[in-house]
Amino acid sequence: MSNPNAPQYPQQPQQPVYAPQAPPAAPAYAPRPALPTTLAYTNTFALVSIITAFLSPIAAIVFGHMALGQIKRNGDAGRGIALTGLIIGYVYAVSIVILVIAYVSIFAVMFASLASLSSSYRY
């Protein structure tokens, strides 16, 4: 029994209780077969060019030009790979030449300054 002296509060409306629903089932798709890669159709010299671009720039340049010739003649895939190998090979070769020139010039300036320094001191 309720207490008659207790304060009376207005009752809040009852919210309907919903049962949690299971997520909708994913549609059953048949697995697609794996697509074949185009690596088998890519020119071999183009692949060799991109691989050797970081190891030997001269080899990358040679194989890249050979690959471009074969791709033009046979219509193989891999023109972008051959061009990438060529570009990296040329950039690498030019940077090596610039570094060698800078290295030699630093030593030439050093020896020239030592020669002028030693000639200025008389014993």
Image (tube, rainbow, N blue to C red):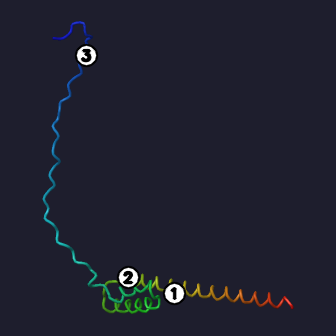
Q: Which of marks 1 and 2 is nearer the N terminus?
A: 2
Q: Name the residue under label 3.
A: 10
Secondary element at tag 3: loop
Comparing 117 with 85, the one in front is 117
Q: Mark 1 points at which residue?
A: 93
Q: Residue at x 30, y 87 (%)?
A: 76
Q: Nearer the viewer, mark 2 or mark 3?
A: 3
105 w.r.t. 29: above or below: below
Q: For residue 70, what is the image quadrant?
A: bottom left
What's under tag 1, amino acid-wise?
Ala
- Report the Cα–Cα distance between label 1 and label 3: 87 Å
Neighbor class of circle 2 (other Cα within 10 Å; few <14, some 14-19, many 20+) is many
Q: Which residue is drawn at 40% across and 91% down?
A: 63
Per the rendering, the mark at residue 81 is 2
Q: Which of marks 1 and 3 is nearer the N terminus?
A: 3
Asked if the residue at tag 3 contacts the one at tag 2, i.e. Cβ–Cβ closer than 8 Å, the answer is no
Q: Where is residue 35 in the image (x, y as percent from the top left)?
A: 21, 74
View extreme (right): residue: 123
Is residue 113 found left or right of 21 in the rendered image?
right
Comparing 84 with 48, the one in front is 48
What's under tag 3, amino acid-wise?
Pro
Q: For residue 36, what is the image quadrant?
A: bottom left
99 w.r.t. 20: above or below: below
Q: Residue at x 35, y 85 (%)?
A: 47
Q: Residue at x 41, y 86 (%)?
A: 52
On the rendered image, what quadrant is the C terminus found in?
bottom right
Q: For residue 73, what is the image quadrant?
A: bottom left
What's under tag 2, amino acid-wise?
Ile
On the rendered image, what quadrant is the N terminus found in?
top left
Comparing 122 with 10, the one in front is 122
Secondary element at tag 1: helix
Q: Position of residue 92 (x, y in %)?
A: 50, 84
